[in-house]
Image (cartoon, rainbow, N blue to C red):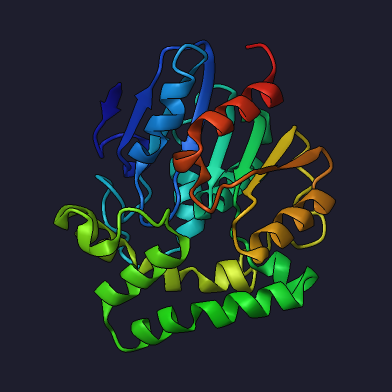
Amino acid sequence: MTAGGPDRPGGVFSRSFGHGPRNVLAVHCSLAHSGAWRRLAGEMAEDITLTAFDMLSHGRSPDWDGTGNYQLLNADAGLALLDRPADLIGHSFGATVALRMAMARPHLVRSLTLIEPVLFAVAKSDAPAAFAALEAASRPIEAAWAAADLALTARLFNRMWGAGEPKWPDMPEQARAAMVRAIPVVPACYPTLYDDANGTLAPGALDPVAMPVLLLHGSESPAVIGAIVSGFSRRLANARALSVPGAGHMLPVTHAAETAQLLRGFWGPA
């Protein structure tokens, strides 16, 4: 593994895993960090060299100062690491960042893999019932945030979207503190994710995303994710969607071997 400090392009920390011929850039989910790709990269160490960066307010990257658009700032940071064409992977919020990267620089993206993308505006438009269920499930998180209880907000968010293990009290204090540090960016991104404030779904906006796209979701994920995947399948010209049996939202971590197998089939030979 190799790593670069926060003086790297875009001011973010990045690291690389593996030593294979295929160049891959990966964007992690909210409240995680670049190390979340370690298991998947380990499954494919002979096939790929995977570079991952810590989004702002995550891992070893600087804190976001609240100015500018968080999604687009991270997309710019990721693009600064792309000096040649790569296969791009994003998970959850990181998938929305990866999508914006592909929209901005399609000539640098050989293929795009969106794992459990959380652009909820897709479901808001296409699947009102699934969107309403998401809103209902999120109410305890919203109440904790309104009460300015950052630790409870992070705990409830992790319970809803995390792998389920370890439980919050069993996590190392450092891991809990990292999630509390990152949690303010989640509500800050609601206009982007719920209302499509960045215009990802605007007419013609997705036209540059003509490269092959793989949409992955877990069979046990909330229904809203399946609705989003279906919506993107209809909106992207060259997309295919696959479900990982028995997996939830954290499938790149919990089902790394299955994810690796699907990626090999999608990419084909290096």
Label count reads: 0
Pinpoint residue 13: horizontal percent, then vertical percent: 30, 39
Q: Nearer the viewer, residue 164 or 2?
A: 164
Residue 88 sits above or below residue 250 on the image: above
Q: Quadrant of residue 184?
A: bottom left
Query: In the picture provided, is 47 more to the left or to the right than 32?
Result: right
Q: Residue at x 60, y 53 (%)?
A: 117
| Quadrant location, the N terminus | top left
| Quadrant location, the C terminus | top right
Q: Which residue appears farthest toward the front when viewing the image?
A: 246
Pinpoint residue 193: horizontal percent, then vertical percent: 58, 67
Q: Nearer the viewer, residue 84 or 25?
A: 25
Q: Residue at x 36, y 25 (%)?
A: 16
> Can residue 79 be spotted in the picture?
no
Pinpoint residue 84: horizontal percent, then vertical percent: 55, 21
Q: Quadrant of residue 179?
A: bottom left
Query: In the picture provided, is 7 more to the left or to the right than 68?
Result: left
Q: Residue at x 70, y 72 (%)?
A: 130
Q: Which residue appears farthest toward the left when viewing the image?
A: 173
Q: Quadrant of residue 265?
A: top right
Q: Nearer the viewer, residue 214 or 206?
A: 214
Pinpoint residue 120: horizontal percent, then vertical percent: 63, 67
Residue 255 sits above or below residue 177 on the image: above
> Can residue 97 be spotted in the picture?
yes
Residue 230 sits above or below residue 252 on the image: below
